[in-house]
Each structure stands twice: as structure tokens, then as C-alpha cells.
Image: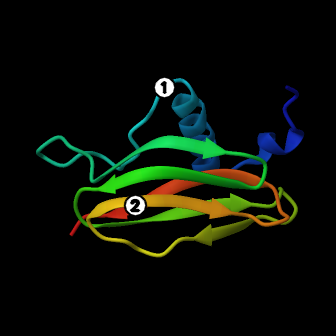
Amino acid sequence: MPVSCEWMYMSRRSWFSVAVVAATLAGGLTVAPAANAAGSPPVECWDWWHNAHKWTAKCEVKRGAARALTDCGDMNNPSTRYGRWVGVGRWDFGGDCGDEHFTASDIQSTEE
């Protein structure tokens, strides 16, 4: 599958997200900031899926809060869409770019 030139101009977060998607397709990935002293990340996600316009993942928020971030558009008209903050529990995360192209996803978390 050919790669669009717009991938050449992605932000650092977007490149990380592409790596997340690639690693996920290879067999699963835990997405989280640096682990706490106990060694476990505050958020773990699995069953990542995406197409040209949207993405989904199942996530468990172990502490603090988390939300989905979705980058849409292209290098000339980028936008980021934010999901609502959710607390501890299992949640379906995702984002929908509508008619725009989906370019990257991320999970933002806070530890309380």
C-alpha cells in the first residue's frame, strides 16, 4: 500500500501514534505515560481498530482519568478532537473524523 506524503509532516505525537498503531497491529500495546513506582501504567488499551476516518480501542483506566485524542485532516488543515474525561473502569475509546481523514490517535491520562 503506498504511503501518502502527508505522513512526512506529522507532529512528534502523531509519529508516536503511528508507531502505536503499527505495534498494535503486530499484537497489542499498552499506552501510558511513564509507569508509577508500582510499575503499572494508569491506562491499558487493546483491540485497536481504525479505517480512513475513525478509530476505536478498548481501554482500562486503572487510576486517575483518561480521554481519547484524534488527529484529523491533513498538513494544510489539521485538527485535534478530544473525547470526554473518564475515570477508573473499562471504557470504549475512539474518535471519528467525519469526512476528514483520520491521521493519528492517542490516549491522554492523568494520575490523581
Quadrant showing the N terminus: top right
Task: Please tell me whether mark 1 sits on a helix, a strand or a loop.
Answer: loop
- The kind of residue tagged 1 is Gly
Quadrant showing the C terminus: bottom left
C-alpha gap between disc 1 and disc 2: 20 Å
Mark 1 sits on what residue?
27
Q: Which of the 4 image quadrants contains residue 31?
A: top left
Query: Left of 51 or right of it: where is 70?
Result: left
Mark 2 sits on what residue?
91
Task: Please tell me whether mark 2 sits on a helix, a strand or a loop.
Answer: strand
Placement of 16 over or under 84, stated as above or below: above
Placement of 16 over or under 43, stated as above or below: above
* Residue sitting nearer the eye, 61 or 69: 61
Residue 102 placement (x, y as % from top left): 74, 54
Circle 2 packing at 10 Å, graded few (<14), some (14-19), many (20+), is some
- Residue at image point 53% right, 29% down: 23
Placement of 91 over or under 87, stated as above or below: above
- The kind of residue tagged 2 is Trp
Query: Left of 106 or right of it: where is 77?
Result: right
- Residue at image point 60% right, 43% down: 49
Give the mark nearer the N terminus: 1 vs 2. 1
Q: Colour mode?
A: rainbow
Residue 4 placement (x, y as % from top left): 87, 38
Residue 77 placement (x, y as % from top left): 84, 66
- Residue at image point 84% right, 45% down: 6
Q: Which of the 4 image quadrants contains residue 72?
A: bottom right
